[in-house]
Amino acid sequence: DTGVSQDPRHKITKRGQNVTFRCDPISEHNRLYWYRQTLGQGPEFLTYFQNEAQLEKSRLLSDRFSAERPKGSFSTLEIQRTEQGDSAMYLCASSPSGRGTYEQYFGPGTRLTVT
Amino acid sequence: GDSVTQMEGPVTLSEEAFLTINCTYTATGYPSLFWYVQYPGEGLQLLLKATKADDKGSNKGFEATYRKETTSFHLEKGSVQVSDSAVYFCALSDYGGSQGNLIFGKGTKLSVKP
């Protein structure tokens, strides 16, 4: 399977704990995106990488959130001091660069539940 | 800022009925438009896309035409099947804007009954 993969698929944590999610994009894709989706809503953009450079961050990405893509391949999204409002599905997507249509391929998501 | 508005669901249809899901957008630039589908228990999949005015995207019997004059990208299918039951998301990417991140509507849940 050469699609986008995410790990873990589900995470339950207690309020105040830190969590880290991993995304492995399609191997030849330079661009990597993180989105958050809450129940009944469409995905909302969080941040974007071009290779290892983080080029854009949404205002949704508070100081408790940090994302990295150290070697331009996989990416991690860390949430520190989790709050109940962080409960959501976290989606990763990747895209090749050089194409104008910005077609993005999504992973299955990591569902976070903060108790 | 840019935004997408799509008709609220849920939409319930009988098999072989005609489907329309309305989508309108607001954008400062010249966006590309997309329909994504999320089947139960699965991730988002691109259904179809259109990159400029009057383009028609099509896939699996679904069609949508990029209408700049009405800022719309309505999804249609002539005869739905039970297997089309899913949540459909309209989205845009502002080519001239940030870096191509997608802006989604809230989604429309479609249920097709046999």
Image (spheres, rainbow, N blue to C red):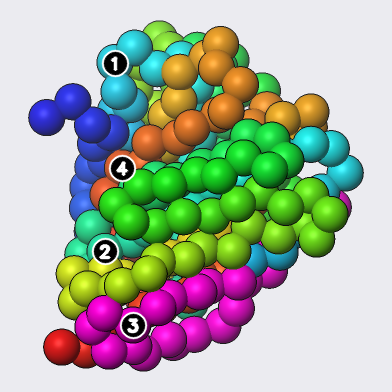
What is the CA distance from the residue labelled 4 to the residue labelled 1?
A: 13 Å
What is the CA distance from the residue labelled 3 to the residue labelled 4?
A: 31 Å
x, y percentage for residue A75? 39, 27
Q: Which residue is mark 1?
A: A27
Helix, strand or loop status at disc 1? loop
**Residue A107 image label:** 4
Residue type, mark 4 in image: Gly
Crowdedness near tag 4: few (<14), some (14–19) or many (≥20) residues, C-alpha within 10 Å: many
Residue A2 appears in view:
yes
Image height of A56 relative to A60, above or below: above
What is the CA distance from the residue labelled 2 to the residue labelled 1?
A: 25 Å
Q: Nearer the viewer, mark 3 or mark 2?
A: 3
Residue type, mark 1 in image: Ser
Q: Which residue is mark 3?
A: B17
Q: Does residue B50 appear left or right of residue B108 in this picture?
A: right
Q: Does residue A63 appear left or right of residue B90 in this picture?
A: right
Q: Nearer the viewer, mark 3 or mark 4?
A: 3
Q: Which residue is mark 2?
A: B39
Residue type, mark 2 in image: Tyr
**Residue B7 image label:** none
Pointer 3 and pointer 2: residues touching (CB < 8 Å)? no
